[in-house]
Amino acid sequence: MQIKISTPRSFNFVRTVFSHGWSELVPFELDQKKWRLLRVIDLPARPPVSITICRAKGGLRIEAGEELNEAQEAAIAKAVRHMLRLDDDLKPFYAAVGGSENFEWIAREGAGRLLRAPTVFEDLVKMICTTNCSWALTDKMVNALVRLLGSETPDGRRSFPSPEAMAAMPVAFYSNEVRAGYRAGYLKELADQIASGAVDVEGWLTTELATPELKREMKKIKGVGDYAAENVLRLVGRYDGLALDSWIRSKFSRTRNKGRTASDKKIERYYSSFGEWRGLALWCDMTRDWLDGNKAAAS
């Protein structure tokens, strides 16, 4: 089964799937040699399905190893458009950075679209799993969640667990099996809140709340501080926050401050001219070199 979808002229598949670490976390899998992105997608009234997304003439090709009906194909196409941000309008962003010497490459290379999960819930759980720990530990926690609670596909992979599946487990499961440490209670409470309908994180995608108010709403969830909230804001299309962490501070010092430690205020001033797009400008700036030397990416 194959589905073809069109993409904006500015869309860069490689820059998007490699925009941050999500492509390394199941149920994503990224083949960097052929630049093919695999993802497990949940579908209603049937087991989830593994799809592969790759570049094709005029857009993208989505492949699945089984037959799907028209409604299921439409659901997959919608999920792919959401994950790859194909309906995001980045023209104002490109206009904002176009006149700056160190940032004009962003529009030329079609950077700026940040890969996200099919649901805000998954993005939020993964973001909580990135706080105050190594990437290796994040990977272990996410792998455990998917392996132990995800629904199985016909090819043996597993989807990201639903809020209901996570809510059904006790806090001890997150401590002992997921090895989530102090996050165990946060993951359990988040799943409980969403499964019961007490919190609607998917509504963050379309809310009319101003960004500062939305950030306050996000921070009401235990385990979500400034860093996590500002990163999730990027994934719902709000780019005001810089989401500064030790990696960004170190990278900025090396690349923009001659190796000297820079204060947060100096970093903020450096990107302040980009206004509401400053967080996205920072992220593109700090990750520009991620594809250096990769011939497959340039082809």
Image (cartoon, grey):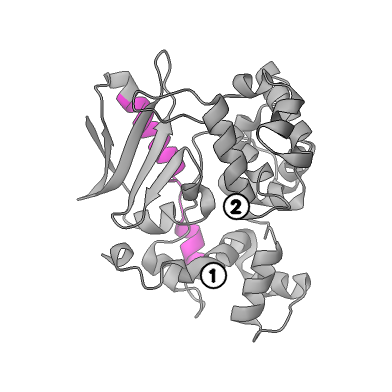
SS class of the residue under badge 2?
Answer: helix
Q: Quadrant of the C terminus?
A: bottom left
In this view, the residue farthest toward the bottom is 258
178 vs 295, left or right, is right
- The answer to which of 161 and 137 lies nearer the viewer is 137
Q: Is residue 95 magenta?
A: yes
- In this view of the protein, which residue sits in the foreground, 101 or 286? 286
Does residue 236 show up magenta in the picture?
Answer: no
Callout count: 2
Q: Which residues are magenta?
A: 73-96
Q: Position of residue 249 (x, y in %)?
A: 69, 70
Extreme-top residue of the structure:
45
User: Is residue 43 in view?
Assistant: yes
Residue that mark 1 sits on: 285
Residue at 25% across, 24% down: 66
Q: Secondary structure at mark 1?
A: helix
> Label 2 amino acid?
Ala
For residue 168, what is the image quadrant? top right
Q: Is residue 123 visible?
A: no
Residue beneath disc 2: 136
Q: Whole-percent x and y of residue 36? A: 32, 48
Query: In the current view of this chain or complex, which residue is farthest to the front?
Result: 176
Q: Are marks 2 and 1 in contact (CB under 8 Å)?
A: no
Between label 2 and label 1, give the one nearer the viewer.
Answer: 2
Which amino acid type is shown beneath numbered disc 1?
Asp
Q: Residues within 10 Å of mark 1 (few under 14, many from 20)?
A: some
